[in-house]
């Protein structure tokens, strides 16, 4: 239920009279019967009969057996029996359903009729549940997209008069990271919404506070287990699956029959609101001071506290002697009571803390995060609450801090209820960390955000020169290999680089022969990790050695970010040169002059 409710329809003789009158009025109109299916009432089995389990487990109920409005329909039902639309706007105020809310119910009926025609879901059943759960989204207070504004939240299901359901969604739906609360016009608890949530308005979100999304989710939930809602037993079980209470079933059934007799559309925001609810507590009321229930349909019932009876006195109006004073003389002086603290109004009471739209928190090591953590505080009525101190704390080993080098900062919420933490500056170590937002005293609300620091990246890497790299078998390469990594054409400092000897340029197959590096124990290795570019984005590789195998080999360097370069390494023996033999006498014999070809004619003689 969107607010605190009574869990009993009526008490004492007033209950009997009103209920009897309601049944008589419904019978007189010859409307379809709203009887409970056999076994739905009076059974000792809470699962079958729907006995009240508000102080225990939820037993799978969609609302977690949260409170609900117990107002009954008016004794005068709408005109035109059998009609479900077309009644004039001047009809009964309770028969009017806000336009967006009514459209959502009818759209859900059409959608379910397409996907699950055997269920035969009537939109009037959704209207009955919507009335009991939230008073038709608080009388149709929804925006143009059908989203309740402000959002509708039930009380914390903390076992204090309600079911005990610890937080299941980290406050994502209900803004409460300690206990769950029923959310939205159809009052789904977060764990149920996680399974049944729908996107009926096509905005890409499954929002329990949107009447279109919530109505379709409720329709599909009611149709579960192959139910046929034209059968009384199936309809009863469907309603009991929503809230396992026979009183809840009777209340929903009453509104279901009422809406079947006729409804009409009214403007959003003009619907009739249910009675002001009371707050269930685990304590038992004192028998001598009963609390009568308000009349259905309004909050102007009789006073909950009857006037005290006058104290007995002796004839003549004189007060009784004070037994503590000898002789009984003098007047009595009551002991002054300390002043009762003035309760904080709900509009000023901190109610919940929620995510105010913080997106994914990711940044490269050493860089600033584009996204900032933002939360929103709400009061007990669900409206934004200003001036609430929120403490943000960074936890983790990445070295990430808030601007100014702080791990913890405090920010107060503004007029719109939001508080935004300072900019986050990523540390140098890649990994995950968390940012925690805490607000409130006594029972503080906590939200936790996961964040990630990724290693520095490069989008290009290349050698700083083009000199051929050659070594003889069993020797080391004389020239060192130096590369430079860049990111967006700027030097990329601190980028991790992996060097691997490979057989192919794509690096699919590692090489187990040819050139190699040496590890700390002077043993050959053909892959090096943990290499990092310096402040200028450059990296000088360790010495490279050649084994006894000649040939051309490939060295592949890969950076964090996917940039790579392939370098050729050649292993070949040095070319041998044969020295010339000296002529006799210790001098080298001159080469003989070239003899002219005998076939060639003699050169012409100069005259």
Image (spheres, rainbow, N blue to C red):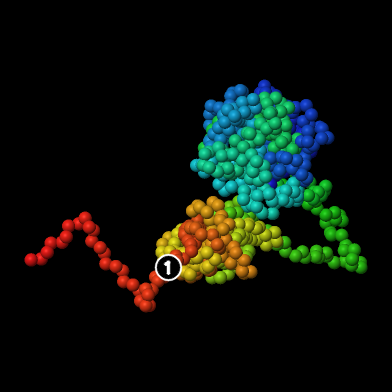
Nearer-the-camera pick, 496 or 160: 496
- Give the farthest residue toward the bottom: 585
Image quarter of residue 125: top right
Quarter of the image where the N terminus is located: top right
- Label 1 residue SS: loop
Image quarter of residue 490: bottom left
Q: Position of residue 489 (x, y in %)?
A: 41, 62
Q: Position of residue 432 (x, y in %)?
A: 61, 59
Q: Which residue is mark 1?
A: 578
Q: Position of residue 126 (x, y in %)?
A: 63, 33
Camera sees residue 91: no
Left or right: 78 in relation to 561: right
Eyeballing the image, is 291 above or below 466?
Answer: above
Image quarter of residue 522: bottom right
Q: Position of residue 512 (x, y in %)?
A: 58, 57
Residue displayed at 63% across by 64% down:
396
Nearer-the-camera pick, 140 or 339: 140
Residue displayed at 50% across by 67% down:
477
């Amino acid at each position: 239920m969107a607010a605190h409710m009574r869990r009993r329809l009526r008490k004492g003789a007033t209950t009997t009279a009103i209920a009897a009158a309601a049944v008589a009025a419904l019978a007189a109109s010859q409307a379809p019967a709203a009887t409970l299916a056999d076994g739905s009432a009076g059974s000792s089995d809470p699962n079958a009969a729907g006995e009240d389990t508000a102080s225990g487990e939820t037993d799978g109920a969609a609302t977690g057996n949260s409170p609900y409005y117990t107002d009954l329909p008016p004794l005068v039902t709408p005109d035109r029996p059998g009609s479900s639309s077309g009644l004039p706007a001047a009809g009964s105020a309770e028969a009017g359903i806000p336009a967006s809310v009514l459209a959502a119910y009818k759209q859900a009926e059409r959608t379910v009729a397409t996907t699950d025609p055997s269920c035969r879901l009537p939109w009037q059943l959704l209207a009955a549940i919507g009335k009991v759960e939230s008073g038709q989204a608080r009388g149709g207070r929804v925006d143009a997209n059908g989203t309740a504004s402000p959002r509708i939240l039930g009380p914390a299901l903390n076992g204090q008069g309600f079911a005990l359901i610890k937080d299941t969604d980290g406050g994502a739906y209900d803004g409460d990271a300690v206990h769950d609360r029923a959310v939205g016009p159809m009052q789904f608890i977060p764990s149920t919404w996680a399974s049944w949530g729908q996107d009926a308005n096509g905005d890409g979100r499954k929002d329990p506070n949107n009447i279109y999304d919530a109505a379709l989710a409720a329709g599909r939930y009611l149709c579960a287990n192959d139910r046929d809602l034209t059968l009384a037993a199936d309809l009863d079980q469907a309603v009991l699956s929503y809230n396992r209470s026979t009183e809840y079933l009777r209340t929903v059934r009453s509104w279901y029959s009422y809406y079947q007799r006729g409804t009409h559309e009214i403007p959003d925001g003009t619907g009739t609101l249910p009675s002001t609810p009371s707050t269930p507590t685990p304590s038992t009321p004192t028998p001598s001071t009963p609390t009568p229930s308000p009349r259905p349909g309004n909050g102007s019932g009789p006073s909950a506290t009857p006037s005290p009876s006058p104290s007995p006195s002796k004839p003549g109006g004189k007060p009784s002697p004070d037994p503590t004073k000898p002789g009984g003389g003098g007047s009595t002086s009551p002991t002054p009571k300390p002043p009762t603290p003035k309760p904080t109004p709900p509009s000023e009471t901190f109610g919940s803390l929620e995510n105010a739209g913080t997106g994914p928190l990711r940044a490269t090591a050493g860089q600033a995060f584009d996204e900032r953590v933002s939360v929103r505080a709400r009061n007990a009525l669900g409206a934004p609450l200003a001036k609430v101190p929120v403490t943000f704390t960074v936890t983790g080993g990445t070295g990430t801090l808030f601007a100014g080098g702080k791990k913890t900062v405090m920010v107060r919420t503004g007029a719109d209820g939001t508080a935004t933490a300072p900019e986050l500056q990523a540390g140098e170590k890649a990994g995950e960390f968390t940012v925690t937002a805490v607000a409130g005293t006594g029972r503080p609300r906590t939200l936790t955000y996961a964040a990630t620091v990724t290693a520095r990246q490069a989008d290009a890497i290349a050698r700083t020169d083009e000199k051929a790299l050659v070594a003889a078998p069993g020797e080391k390469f004389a020239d060192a290999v130096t590369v430079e990594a860049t990111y967006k054409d700027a030097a990329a400092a601190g980028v991790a680089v992996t060097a691997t000897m490979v057989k192919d340029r794509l690096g699919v197959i590692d090489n187990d022969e040819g050139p190699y590096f040496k590890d700390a124990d002077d043993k050959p290795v053909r892959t090096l990790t943990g290499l990092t570019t310096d402040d200028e984005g450059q990296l000088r590789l360790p010495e490279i050695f050649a084994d006894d195998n000649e040939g051309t080999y490939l060295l592949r360097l890969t950076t964090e970010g996917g940039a790579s370069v392939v370098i050729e390494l050649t292993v070949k023996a040095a070319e041998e040169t044969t020295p010339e033999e000296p002529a006799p006498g210790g001098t080298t014999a001159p080469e003989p002059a070239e003899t002219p070809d005998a076939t060639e004619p003699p050169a012409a003689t100069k005259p």
